[in-house]
Image (tube, helix red, strand yellow):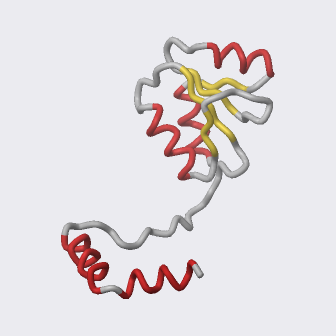
Amino acid sequence: MAAEAIVRFFRQGQTRMLIKRLEAAGVAMTQAAHDGPKPLSQMAFVFTGELQHMSRADAEALVRSLGGTASSSVSRLTSYVVAGASPGSKLAAAKTLGVRVLNETQFKQLIQKK
């Protein structure tokens, strides 16, 4: 059974030594719970173009940390498209599908309201 194999693995001396070395090197062995509010729950965001005050990866991580989802493509399920400088075809897709488009400032205001 898989559970028994996992228990045996973590009982081995070599595994325990490896874990101690990893802890000594600063590797966190637990993950902090994210029990905070999730104001963007049930919302999906797509980012297009270059944002001025944060990277796309940071913006997507912010959305996820607040309970939303970040996608790379626009669909009818998309709540908002955030358009930075030089947006691509995602902006046109948003307009075609009737998805609300925000600029970076409007996105920040939305986040602060939530």
70 is higher (above) or lower (below) than 12:
above
How far across and how far down the image is residue 98, in percent?
A: 80, 22
Quadrant of res 101:
top right
107 is higher (above) or lower (below) than 23:
above
Residue 109 lies left or right of residue 57; in this view the side is right
How far across and how far down the image is residue 4, in percent?
A: 53, 85
Residue nearest the viewer, comparing 27 with 92 = 27
- Picture residue at 46% right of the left edge, 24% below the top: 51
- Picture residue at 25% right of the left edge, 70% below the top: 22
Quadrant of res 43:
top right
Residue 62 lies left or right of residue 89; in this view the side is left
Residue nearest the viewer, comparing 34 with 103 = 34
Quadrant into which the N terminus falls: bottom right
Residue 96 lies left or right of residue 80; in this view the side is right
How far across and how far down the image is residue 100, in percent?
A: 72, 26
Report the number of discs. 0
How far across and how far down the image is residue 88, in percent?
A: 58, 14
Residue 104 lies left or right of residue 101; in this view the side is left
- Picture residue at 72% right of the left edge, 35% below the top: 79
- Picture residue at 21% right of the left edge, 74% below the top: 21
Quadrant of res 20:
bottom left
